[in-house]
Amino acid sequence: MTARWRPTRALGRAAAVGLAMLAFGAGLGRGDLAVAGVPLLAVVVWSLVTAPRHAPRITSRLDTRVVREGESLTWRVDVESVPGLRDVVAHLAGDRWTRTVPVHGHVAATVERARDGSAPDTPVAISAEAVRWGVRRLGPAQVVAFSDLAGFAWVSPEQRVESVSSVPRPGLFASRAALPHPVGLVGQHRSTRPGSGTELADIRAFRTGDRLRRIHWPVSLRTGTLHVTTAYADQDAEVRLVVDGLRDLGEHDATTGASSSLDTAVEAAGALAAHYLSTGDRVGLSVLGGAGLVEVPAVGGSHQLTRLLLALGRAEPSTGTIGEERALRAQLGRAVPPGAVVVILSALVSAEPLAHAVRLARSGHVVIVVDTLPESLGGGHPAPEELRAATGVEDDDRTASLVWRLRLLDREREVRRCAAAGVPVVRWRGPGSLDLVLRGVGRRARGAGTPR
């Protein structure tokens, strides 16, 4: 479909006012009125003479479709400079999570023509900043062209709506505690068995098949027989990150730095993935109960972090549909490989993730639950609007406060149930959040494996 050049309201007003002043001036014998109407009619005549005859061709594109949270992308438009085209106006609509530059989203450009009348395509660009992670709907984007003196306008029949993925920025995390039960072939976790690692285990007599580079010459010269060094094997572990997407409590506010429970879970999951992938471990991801099925198998490598961050950017709170409930049951019934460390990031207000943690712990897995509930809701005095959003009670703040207090009591009961099953619950504090828990689990694992 090709749009046509149409006269603007300004052209119609100029024609109407000019003809009226000319008629009244001639009828009333007022030459001044007639003379005042002549410039308006001249503008109309000039606009009709110089009106464009052809629709311009438009080429628009996004410089990227994947950005990091807080970064900007640019929507670029090139408009063909047909004869009679004078100005171009582009508009890109922003929303709550996308901020355009300028804020109103309008950008104008004037066609620059050479002396011979030729002109290159007119470029227009609008920047959009991704305020929050997630899959964002950018647009509709619209282009309007104007002729000389804005007498005629052409509206592009194509209003582009693009899907842009905003990747979350991983938080900061570092841990000095080793993961229990490393079962892989390579990595940076010390095994309890000798192997081709880097940490010295023992010095023993040479045996057939030992590598010559393992010979320890000082001991060999002192004893008169060849001795070799042995080392502990370096193994990798599997970390399974489970993000609770059933509820998103709290509000995200970029100006104040406030984060919702899902914001904290996504940030923590990205930080944990970045850390353990850098140590050579394998990391996988599951988002329980979200609006979209998000599953990433556990592998290692430098590209796995990009896959995990893209998957975290698709995490959305559950909408409660039947399809989401079926997907949740399938996710909860999926087997977890032996030896994997399962980290569940949840606000602890839904029973399914905590029951899943207890089942995994009773089956012998190492499970750690990370509490991501905002501190404003977990203690103190939450704001009335936060209570209304968390409970769904809109008409009575007192009732909303009572409902939330009861929900916190249920939450404490679920936390005690997890502790009784041997599942530690810790708050996310950034670097070192899991060190104490991992050291305790490691001591229990070594103690259980030590013969009496």
Image (cartoon, rainbow, N blue to C red):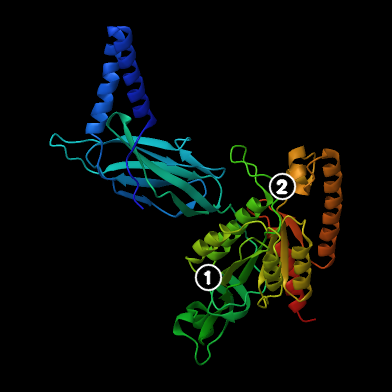
Mark 2 or 1: in front is 2
Name the side, left or right, on which 363 lies relative to 140: right
Question: Residue 317, labelled with which disc?
Answer: none
Amino acid tagged 1: Gly
Give above or below for 395 relative to 407.
Answer: above
SS at badge 1? loop
- Real-space Cα distance between discs 2 and 1? 31 Å
Residue 425 vertical position relative to residue 202 in the rendered view, above or below: above
Q: Position of residue 27 (x, y in %)?
A: 32, 11
Q: Would residue 65 be found to the left or right of residue 7 on screen?
A: right
Of 288 and 227, nearer the camera is 288
Q: Position of residue 262 (x, y in %)?
A: 66, 53
Q: Badge 2 is on which residue?
A: 374
Residue at x-position 48% and y-position 79%? 217
What's the amino acid at mark 2? Pro
Q: Earlier in the sequence, mark 2 or mark 1?
A: 1
Left or right side of 175 for 4:
left
Q: Secondary structure at mark 2?
A: loop
At 73% from the left and 55% from the top, the residue drawn is 347
